[in-house]
Amino acid sequence: MTQRLASLSLDLDNKWSYLKTHGDPGWESYPSYLDVVVPRVLDFLAARDLKITFFVVGQDAALDRNRAALRSIAEAGHEIGNHSFAHEPWLHLYAPDEIARELSRAEDAIESATGFRPRGFRGPGYSFSPPLLEELARRGYDYDASTFPTFLGPIARLYYFLTARLTPDQRAERKRLFGKFAEGFRPLRPYVWRNLKRPLLEIPVTTMPLLKIPIHVSYLLYLAQFSPRLASAYFHAALALCRLNHVEPSILLHPLDFLGADDDPDLSFFPAMNLQSADKLSVVAAAVDALTKRHRVLTMSEHAAAAAAVLNPPPSKGGVRGGTPNRDVSNEVRSVAVVESSPL
Ligand SMILES: [Zn+2]
């Protein structure tokens, strides 16, 4: 069996960001579960000899009490990416100067906490906009990973508005959350945004080829509430469709994939938080082990370097300067097809 390339990343959303988005009080004191979840995730990855990308929120990095947990991620050899400063999923509504300030504050805080300046970005709630892509390109980022090609965005938004506690102002501010139906037509394979001042590589979050429904681990856990076997069969089908369609999967993890009802009763509004952590970990392990069985699993910056290597000319002359030593992956990615696209 040939080993194809895949990448794995974790959006390090913290407890306060879920409370904030859900409209719950108490988020202003920035409650954190990083001390619990980070060691658990690092142990899980070390047991599998995996190096992945953690997209870190600048606000967390700016608080002294989170620094030890964040530094331990970098010390374990994982790549550190930028997941914005304030983790507002309506980042696509920010003006250009607000975007520049948001990126720079996050970069400074993350570098100060972890020792690494991020070279990759993922928007909170998969939000992005032409000014955001322009600013990432201007700042010399190696890649963006904010696009989430799914037709289910409007359904996710409906679910959100039905379950969150929002004021009318907040509803207006968040009305474009999670994207339009047309997001589902975006490519699954890496591509380059070319009509910016500088080209910028995009690595989409992989969704099910053809159907464009989510396949990331939080969605598998949602299915596992009904049937763990269904979740497993669904993920295997998704990986098979990726192989058939020459998609190198970029799979997404979240902290709540590793936390259960036994860890945090405050987050019971979140899908699959009724499961115990041990049950969730077994679903996560089965998914990650299915991925590693047939793929060489890399960080996002390594995935970006591999995709960039098949472009002519490559989008970033400086190469990839992530939090991990570069491994040569350029000759392993013959099946990565890079297409061009325009912002919006
Ligand atoms: Zn997030």
Image: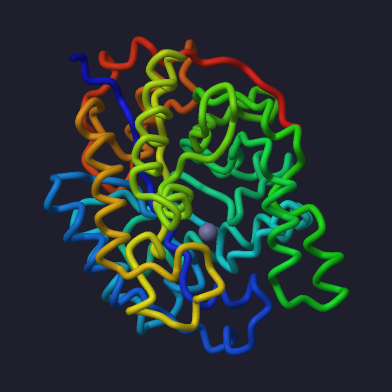
Q: Is residue 133 left or right of residue 104?
A: right
Answer above or below: position of 247 versus 238. Answer: above
Please report the residue visible at 66 percent of the width from the left and 49 percent of the height from the top: 127
The residue nearer to you, when weighing 76 against 185, is 185
Q: On the image, which quarter does residue 297 sit in?
A: top left
User: Where in the figure is residue 47, as x and y percent of width and height?
Assistant: 12, 52
Residue 208 locus on image (x, y percent): 51, 30
Which quadrant is the C terminus positioned in?
top right
Quadrant of residue 282 within the rendered picture: bottom left
Nearer the observer, 208 or 200? 208
Note whether 283 is above or below 341 in the view shown. below
Q: Quadrant of the N terminus?
A: top left
**Residue at 65% over, 73% down:** 22
Residue 110, image x, y percentages:
42, 64
Q: On the rendered structure, is 298 left or right of 146?
A: left
Q: Residue at x 42, y 54 (%)?
A: 221
Lateral position of residue 119 relative to residue 127, left or right: left
- The percent coordinates of residue 93 (x first, y second) are 78, 55
Residue 106 position (above or below residue 323): below
